[in-house]
Amino acid sequence: MKIGIIQQHNTADRDDNRQRLAEGIKNLAQQGAELVVLQELHNSLYFCLEEDVNSFELAEPIPGPSTTFFGQLAKECGVVLVTSLFERRAPGLYHNTAVVLEKDGTIAGKYRKMHIPDDPGYYEKFYFTPGDLGFKPIDTSVGRLGVLVCWDQWYPEAARLMALQGAELLIYPTAIGFDPNDTPDEQQRQRMAWQTVQRGHAVANGLPVVTVNRVGWEEALFWGTSFVAGPQGELLYEAPADKEEQAVVEVDLGRSEQVRRWWPFLRDRRIDEYGELTKRYVD
């Protein structure tokens, strides 16, 4: 499968952000992309840097204006498209939601972010209700996609549950960056840990991983470095840390079958002994 990624620097001009994404999607489709993945909350600046009730005005229903806009693009370009939206479900009820659009422009499925961070610069619990759709892969014409979102990428349980339900690919729209107050060494440790844990999900589940991060300064410095890893964690592609990037990466989905024959982790799981994983902590 040829997978297109768009690592973009966003501004306060939402229309401009969407138009640049549209141009990128068309460009990647012309290069043969069958699946295009966008970064987390790609329509706007990353508004979770602070708690501001006015930012709820950015939210929209699903279906809504963005699913119409990107659905038309998916149909025009003949691609499956993974988008990331600020969902207004009801007054006072909002989600961080990934929507997958099929090649005909219809909604193939959606995933509501399950793990919601609340750290300095990532005040997402103020905005988002934790997802209630579970960890369910989304069936598309290009395969069964295990779509998760950003903070979910630190949790092996999320990746495993997607794999156990037949996901052929793990996909993480992302918005993560540096705290400018951290030392350069600490910044790089965090960035490498972020990539390493996701490459570990690829290895543990025998699945490719696609991670698309935003880039540039938005009162925080997003570290880019979008990447694609194969089912042994091997890096197939890595974007720069400091500039926008569009790329088409070819991934052999059939390789997962062979890797799982060599390393049959799913066969050897001791599911009879894992009950305590459902506890917060084992005292």
Image (cartoon, grey):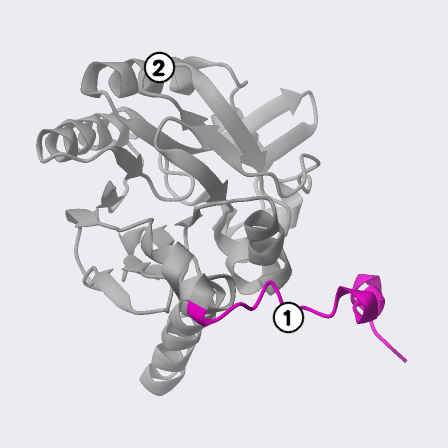
Query: Which mark is drawn over residue 268?
Result: 1
| 271 drawn magenta | yes
Q: Which amino acid type is shown beneath numbered disc 2?
A: Gly
Q: Toward which corner of the image does residue 83 lie, by quadrant?
A: top left
Q: How many marks?
A: 2
Q: Which amino acid type is shown beneath numbered disc 1?
A: Asp
The location of residue 243, given as percent across then percent down, is 17, 56
The residue under the point 56% across, 35% down is: 111
Q: Quadrant of the C terminus?
A: bottom right
Q: Which residues are magenta?
A: 262-283
Which residue is farthest right? 283
Query: Which mark is drawn over residue 172?
Result: none
Name the foreground residue: 88 vs 121. Answer: 88
| 85 drawn magenta | no
Q: Quadrant of the N terminus?
A: top left
Which numbered disc flags the more N-terminal residue, 2 or 1? 2
The residue under the point 35% across, 44% down is: 39
The location of residue 280, given as percent across then percent down, is 82, 66
The residue under the point 34% across, 32% down is: 142
Question: Depth-wise, is mark 2 or mark 1 nearer the camera?
Answer: 1
- Dot 2, how many residues are within 10 Å of its Cα: few (below 14), some (14-19), or many (20+)? many
Q: Report whether residue 190 is seen.
A: yes
Query: In this rendering, is residue 238 above or below 185?
Result: above
The location of residue 135, given as percent across then percent down, is 63, 43
Query: In this rendering, is residue 76 above or below 94?
Result: above
Element at label 2: loop
The location of residue 252, given as percent across then percent down, is 27, 51
The residue under the point 65% across, 48% down is: 125
Q: Kindly identify which residue carries mark 2.
A: 105
Name the foreground residue: 143 vs 255. Answer: 255
